[in-house]
C-alpha cells in the first residue's frame, strides 16, 4: 500500500490507487485471461463504486498500456 500512497501524493490525487499484488481484487473484477493469468488492468471508480473507466491489457506490449495523462484526465473529471 505504501507505493499506492506515493503515486497518489506525487500526482496530487484526492483518491486512493490500488496495486493488487495478491490478485484478490483482480479475481473479483474478472480480469483473468483464458489461462487464469491476470491481465494488466486499470479502473477508475468513483466514491459510490461506479466504474467510469476500465482498460485491460495482456501486458506483453508496453505501448498497449494507457498513458498516465489519459488516466488522470478521467480521474479529474469525476472528482
Image (cartoon, rainbow, N blue to C red):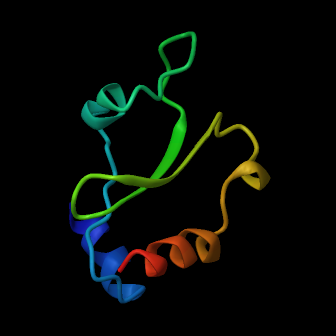
Camera-nearest residue between 6 and 26: 26
32, above or below 3, in the image: above
Residue sitting at x 31%, y 85%: 9
In the rendered image, the quadrant that contains the N terminus is: bottom left
How many numbered marks have been drawn onto this rendered protein structure?
A: 0
Left or right, 39 with respect to 44, comes to right
Residue sitting at x 45%, y 73%: 75
Residue sitting at x 53%, y 71%: 74
Camera-nearest residue between 61 and 54: 54
Camera-nearest residue between 16 and 77: 77
Left or right, 37 with respect to 67, comes to left
Q: Residue 45 in the image: x percent, y percent?
A: 35, 57
Residue sitting at x 25%, y 32%: 24
1, above or below 13, in the image: above
Q: Residue 52 in the image: x percent, y percent?
A: 46, 57
In the rendered image, the quadrant that contains the C terminus is: bottom left
Q: Residue 42 in the image: x percent, y percent?
A: 49, 51
31, above or below 1, in the image: above
Q: Quadrant of residue 21?
A: top left
Left or right, 54 with respect to 45, comes to right
Amino acid at each position: 500500500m505504501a507505493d499506492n500512497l506515493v503515486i497518489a501524493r506525487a500526482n496530487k490525487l484526492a483518491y486512493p490507487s490500488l496495486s493488487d499484488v495478491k490478485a484478490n481484487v483482480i479475481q473479483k473484477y474478472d480480469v483473468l485471461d483464458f489461462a487464469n493469468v491476470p491481465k494488466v488492468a486499470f479502473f477508475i471508480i468513483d466514491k459510490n463504486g461506479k466504474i467510469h473507466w476500465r482498460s485491460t491489457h495482456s501486458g506483453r506490449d508496453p505501448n498497449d498500456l494507457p498513458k498516465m495523462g489519459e488516466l488522470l484526465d478521467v480521474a479529474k473529471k469525476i472528482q
